[in-house]
Each structure stands twice: as C-alpha cells, then as structure tokens.
Image: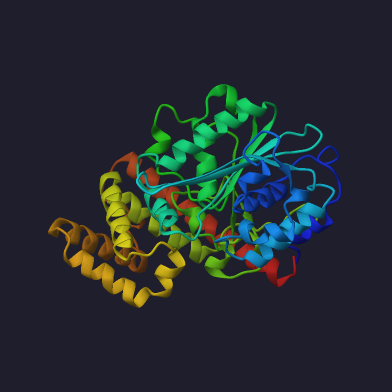
C-alpha cells in the first residue's frame, strides 16, 4: 500500500486544480521537523521553495536529530520534484529553545502557489530531553510556554500573510495546533479552514474549560488504528478519523507508515479495541490524579530526567540501566513527600492499567449525572468493540 512518500511522488495536479487535502497537510506537518538553515531566508516572508531545499549540501543540517532520516529525505525529494509541491514556499520559520523556561518550539508557514492559501505547521517532539519534558507537562492544567508561543505564532503569521489558512501538526505539534486555534481571536479563526492534529494528544480538560477557549474552531483529529498518544485526554472516537497503518503497536504513531489510496488515507472503522481500553484507563488515571497532583508529578518526572544528565532522549533510553539507577538514587534523596507522590502515582498507574479503574465500575453515587456518565462510557466501549470487529473483517476480506 502507498505511503505519503508515494503520494508526493505521484501528485501532479496543482492546488488550483485540487485544493489542499489532509494528506497534503500531513506531508507539510512532517516537513516541519526539518531544521531549516536561516541563511536561506526561511525566517522572512519570501521564504524558500521546497524545490530549493533538497540539495545534497543541505541534507545533514536539515535532518539533524530527525528520526527516520532516510525516509524523511525521500519525502522531501519527492515533494521538491512534484508539480504540486515544488513551488510551495517555506517561510516565517521559527525554532526556539529555552531550557530555563522549559520551552522548545518550532513552526513553519508554507505558502501555497497561485494564492491558494497558507499552512501553519508546528513541529512535534524531537530527540531532546527538553522536548520530552514538555510532553510530560502537556498533562497539566495550565498552558505550557510552547502552547502560548504557538498561539502568538498563528496570530503573527495570519497577520503577516493574510488570506486563507490551514493549521496542522504531528504529535506534540498537533496539540500545539489545537491550542493555537482554540485560543485564537475571532478574526484569526475566520481565516482558518481546518486545524488538523495528526495523532497529537488531547488537551487537559481544564484548558478547554477556560472562558478564552473556543470549542467551535474547525478541529479535525486523525489517529492510526493503534493510537495511544493521540487518545490521551480523548473520551470519544466520534470526531476522529482513524487511519490504517502498515506498522504495529506504537510504531503506528509514525506518519510515514500511514497508508494512502489515491488522494486520501485508507480509513478504519475505529481504533483497535485493546488500544482503546488502554488509553481510557490511562485517561482515568490522569483524571483521578487531579490537576494539582498531575502538575506535581510532571515536575517530579522532569526533575528525575534532569538527574540523569542526558540531553538526548534516545541516549537516556539507550543507557537506561545506568540512568534508571541514577534516577532511583536521586529519588531516594528527594523529600519524603516527593517519594510518596511517586510511589503512590506509580502504584495507581499499574493497578489502573492491569486491573481497571473505579470509573469502569457501576457508580456508587446514586445521582443522575453519575449514572449518565457510566452509561455513556458503556456505549463508547461497545462502539469501540464493534468498530474493532468491523476493521478486522475489512482486513480479512482485503478491503
């Protein structure tokens, strides 16, 4: 089955002939991971054509710290040679890292040819420990610096270029895109056609209950069948598009494994039931922890990652034996309250994932709200089971 690389190689019509699609948006969202050399003029309004980015002398700098560098280069080459993409201009590029503020942020605006509009694409998590600490803090009830920066970037880009906009991002980039659109002022939101989150985590419910949040923004979330990241803080599949992936388990998070047929993704009826159940139990654990304890636990995890002295997340995992020992030693010297918090949270996590949560049981609180919530959960669970079976039937019949 074809991938987005194959799609880019064969897409020859212009954006005038065929307007921007969600497959196009994913291609551009993945290019947002590239480290664009500022000397090319990518930070200004004029920018640089994609056709001019695939030079061999740029390869090392563009792909620095990028996962799946080989396939990513294939995508860039395909887009730079495609009549559809080659004249797209990458501009207003921003890449900021501030350890003291706990922020790592990058975004690129892609201007489509023939006045067909612009696409703001937010970069997801890279291989730095700083980036992964940001992921942990996304579970908190207050916006992290990268989210606030994403909102100002969208306003600035829309004000600079005007016209029609689309917004997108993969993984953390999807969460940034969602926050930026949900917090955008009315005049900016009217410029946005669709805000695509490609397997990005949902937002903490406390963020979406603030008066400045606009739930009527044009959101669209796409997740692979085995999604875990994209299902965090999500309680329903109703508003999601589920995509078939050629990979298994957590590797489905990588969009270069998402299957394309013609000009669209190959779609599934719903997420895998085991992935659905696991995600709901993780959501139960996060919800039962509460916003204050989530924030305290997030900061404790970030402190433990810092205690390893690693700057690369892959190095942290590669030397996990020694790094885990260092984290345990740091925790043993932490205040007793932090030790108790960590032990309690981890015990609750293991029990919730393996045995289920209190929210899966019939409510003891005999109120209409409690029974309605329990009934809604049962309906979602039954729907997930049915969708899982339908997807398996499609696979068996070759659909």
Residue 144 locus on image (x, y percent): 40, 42
Please state, as top left, top right, bottom left or bottom right, where the C terminus lies in the image. Answer: bottom right
Q: Give the answer, above or below, for where 2 lies relative to 37.
A: below
Please give the name of the residue rendered at 72% of the width and 59% of the height, measured from the top-left corner: 75
Q: Position of residue 389 (x, y in %)?
A: 60, 65
- Against 177, residue 36 (above or below) is below
| Residue at the extreme bottom of the image, as rendered | 321
**Which residue is the extreme one toward the top?**
187
229 vs 158, left or right, is: left
Occupied quadrant, residue 73:
bottom right
Residue at the spot 50% in from the left edge and 50% down from the top edge: 172
Picture coordinates of residue 268, whole percent (x, y):
65, 58
**Residue 26 seen anywhere in this rendered image of the structure:** yes
The colour scheme used here is: rainbow
Quarter of the image with the N terminus is bottom right
Residue 266 shows in the view: no
Q: Position of residue 214 (x, y in %)?
A: 50, 30
Image quarter for residue 281?
A: bottom left
228 and 191: which one is in front? 191
């Amino acid at each position: 089955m074809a991938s987005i690389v194959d799609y880019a190689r064969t897409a020859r019509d212009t954006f005038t002939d065929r307007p921007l699609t969600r497959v196009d948006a994913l291609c551009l969202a993945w290019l947002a991971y590239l480290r664009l050399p500022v000397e090319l003029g990518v930070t200004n309004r004029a920018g640089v054509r994609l056709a001019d980015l695939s030079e061999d002398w740029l390869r090392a700098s563009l792909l620095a710290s990028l996962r799946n560098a080989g396939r990513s280069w294939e995508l860039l080459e395909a887009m730079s040679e495609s009549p559809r993409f080659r004249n797209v201009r990458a501009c207003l590029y921003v890449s900021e890292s501030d350890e003291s503020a706990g922020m790592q942020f990058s975004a690129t605006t892609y201007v489509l040819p023939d006045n067909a509009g612009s696409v703001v694409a937010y970069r997801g998590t890279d291989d730095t420990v700083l980036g992964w600490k940001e992921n942990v803090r996304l579970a908190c009830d207050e916006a992290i610096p990268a989210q606030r920066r994403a909102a100002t970037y969208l306003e600035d880009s829309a004000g600079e270029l005007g016209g029609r906009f689309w917004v997108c991002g993969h993984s953390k980039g999807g969460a940034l895109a969602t926050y930026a659109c949900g917090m955008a002022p009315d005049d900016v939101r009217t410029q946005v056609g669709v805000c695509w989150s490609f397997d990005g985590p949902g937002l903490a419910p406390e963020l979406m209950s603030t008066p400045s949040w606009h739930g009527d923004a044009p959101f669209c979330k796409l997740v692979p069948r085995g999604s875990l990241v994209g299902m965090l803080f999500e309680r329903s599949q109703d508003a999601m598009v589920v995509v078939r992936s050629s990979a298994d388990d957590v590797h489905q998070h990588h969009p270069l494994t998402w299957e394309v047929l013609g000009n669209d993704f190959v779609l599934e009826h719903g997420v895998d039931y085991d992935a659905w159940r696991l995600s709901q139990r993780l959501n139960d654990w996060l919800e039962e922890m509460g916003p204050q304890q989530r924030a305290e636990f997030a900061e404790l995890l970030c402190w433990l990652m810092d205690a390893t002295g690693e700057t690369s997340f892959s190095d942290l995992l590669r030397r996990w034996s020694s790094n885990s020992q260092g984290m345990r030693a740091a925790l043993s010297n932490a205040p007793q309250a932090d030790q108790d918090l960590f032990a309690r949270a981890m015990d609750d996590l293991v029990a919730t994932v393996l045995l289920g949560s209190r929210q899966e049981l019939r409510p003891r609180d005999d109120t209409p709200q409690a029974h309605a919530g329990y009934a809604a959960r049962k309906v979602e669970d039954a729907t997930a089971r049915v969708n899982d079976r339908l997807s398996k039937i499609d696979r068996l019949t070759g659909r």
